[in-house]
Amino acid sequence: MTNAAETSPTPVEHGTREARPLTPAAFVQADSALAERLADRLVRIESLLDAVVEQASALPDEACHHLLRAGGKRVRPLLVLLAAEFGESDRVDIDRAAAAVELIHLATLYHDDVMDDAPMRRGAPAAHTVWGNSVAILTGDLLFARASLLTSQMGTAAVRLQAETFERLVLGQLHEFTGPADGIDPIDHYLEVLGDKTGSLIAAAGEFGLRYSDAPGELIAPLREYGEKVGVAFQLADDLIDLVSDGAKSGKTPGTDLREGVATLPVLYVRQDARAGDAFAREVVALLEEDLGSDAALERARQALVAHPATARARRAAEAWAEDAVAALAPVPDGEVKDGLVEFARSAVTRVA
């Protein structure tokens, strides 16, 4: 078995697999030197990811590469690289950190798909539909282990940051599973879950980039606040994409969250309005509480929720979280890197159809 501690963080050829650098154009000007530098670094990180997850046995190797090959936005590695631009960005530990945060993210996807019984991920069959739940869960564990091997090469502070982030990821999943305790507002609970499940890793990506490029320490707090808030905005936008977007573009059947009984923000808002006496909201809630196993029932409920003002209100909430993330960057030096972070925060919500 290949030990991650022995892998090189420089580009490697690995069988017939090809690195897939993703354009950073969503963050910075496409024709800038920074964009070219980020694209080059992403090639290195893609190769590192491919090498780090390699396993000697066929099944774990295939399973570990399954979602990696399916692509993805590589948002978290790119945020590590952007944050590192405030210091000495071309360091081995920056590559390791960027690969580690992506492996942590991928591991959570394997686990989440089992818990949600999701059939597809990134346009490919979810791992549990190919190999079963046990293999999918163990594969996620393997990816967490490989992320830990990478951060162990960076020192105890990196391992601590990873462990603290991992704890929040797990607690977020547990709190989502158990639901709000008595007396806790369901909307506040949901937003806290999103902060743990999504915001924590994006915040960690920024901190990794700053710490391991020796960037000024005073940037850590604003970048962490930015990451926490942009993570919530990003997930709120994903919830809306599930509800309102063309399934061919989003890769999910519209309304999947409704069918699975996931109480996303539009659902929480419409229930709140129903309790307050809104007759239209009560009609929507009644549709949501029907058996949504048939496509026709699901579509009726989805269309009713989209038509209710609760959905527009949820969109405004996502936009507000994105703008709060931008505001958190006030202490950050002006320039192309900050502009890229601002653009990412806003594009996270404008991608909603």
Image (cartoon, rainbow, N blue to C red):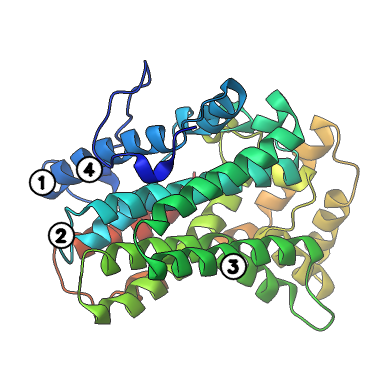
Q: Which mark is residue 32?
A: 1
Amino acid of disc 3: Arg
Label 2 and label 1: CA atoms lie apart by 9 Å
Q: Residues within 10 Å of mark 4 (few under 14, many from 20)?
A: many
Q: Secondary structure at mark 4?
A: helix
Q: Please tell me which residue lies in front, 164 or 179.
A: 164
Residue at label 2?
Answer: 336
Q: Which mark is residue 168?
A: 3
Amino acid of disc 1: Ser
Picture layout, residue 306 above or below residue 202: above
Whether tag 4 and tag 3 are in contact, CB under 8 A, the answer is: no
- Residue 30: which quarter of the image? top left
Q: Which mark is residue 41?
A: 4
Q: Earlier in the sequence, mark 2 or mark 1?
A: 1
Q: Secondary structure at mark 1?
A: loop
Amino acid of disc 2: Glu
Q: Earlier in the sequence, mark 1 or mark 3?
A: 1
